[in-house]
Amino acid sequence: MGTRATETAERKKRCVDAAVALAAEGGYDAVQMRDVAAKAEVALGTLYRHYASKDQLLLAAMLQQTETLRERLVQRPPRGDTPAARVADVLRRASRALERDPKTTRAMLNAMSSEDEAAVPVKHDIDQTLRAIIADAIANHPQASWGGGERVDRLDDIVHVLGSVWFAELTYWTNGLSTAATMADNLGRAASLVLP
């Protein structure tokens, strides 16, 4: 990567880190573009050139977190003798990571719910990364067999359902409708209902 590209990447990272720091302090409403620029030590115009809204910033942070989670799962694969056990382990680990910073998690979920059309590509990237995390926990390859020789031919449907349950549970938790422990238990239960 050239010097200019490296500097741009570093600036973008500072902007995302600043948005996360502000969200951790005060949640979604605390992430104001002027404050992000000041904290990241970049011009406001530079910030807007990279991220047109705080939703895009928070989604960039969420994408970064999901990619980090996927890397960690490669380094320390999920535990379990069955696909259901491995998926439950992954979802519990991911939920514990998000639980450490509830204001930032809530802010990122608010950004996921935004109507910002320009944010849609990042939302798709987040969705694809989360689906890949679940799919990797089920099997290394979509044609891999489960214990009884059954093919994983419903992998896309299973991943979609589990991803939807995960998002719903995060929404319940961030809105005070469940505890982190309940969220983890429900995710494990959902995995056991759709997987052997």
Image: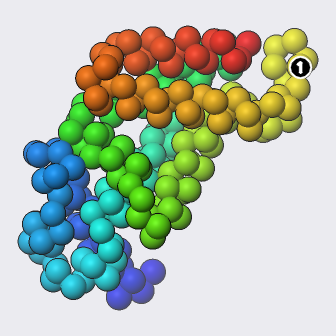
Residue drawn at (39%, 83%) of the image: 5
Residue drawn at (24%, 43%) of the image: 104
Residue 100 lies in quadrant: top left
Is residue 175 found left or right of 63 in the rendered image? left
- Label 1 crowd (10 A; few <14 / some 14-19 / many >=20): few
Image quadrant containing the N terminus: bottom left
Q: Is residue 110 above or below residue 142?
A: below
Position of residue 6 measured from the top left corner of the image (x, y, whole percent): 35, 79
Element type at marker 1?
Answer: loop
Q: Is residue 46 above or below residue 130?
A: below
Is residue 190 found left or right of 174 in the rendered image? right
Residue type highlighted by circle 1: Glu
Residue drawn at (70%, 29%) of the image: 158
Viewer-nearest residue: 27 or 42: 27
Position of residue 74 measured from the top left corner of the image (x, y, whole percent): 55, 39
Q: Is residue 107 above or below residue 15?
A: above
Residue 82 lies in quadrant: top right
Position of residue 196 measured from the top left corner of the image (x, y, whole percent): 73, 13
Residue position marked by numbered label 1 in the rendering: 150
Please state the total of marks drawn on the protein image.
Answer: 1
Q: From where the camera sits, is residue 40 visible?
A: no
| The residue positioned farthest toward the front in the image shown | 115
Position of residue 66 measured from the top left corner of the image (x, y, whole percent): 45, 46
Residue drawn at (55%, 11%) of the image: 189
Viewer-nearest residue: 70 or 165: 165
Is residue 91 found left or right of 182 in the rendered image? right
Q: Is residue 192 above or below residue 114?
A: above
The colour scheme is rainbow
Q: From where the camera sits, is residue 109 visible?
A: yes
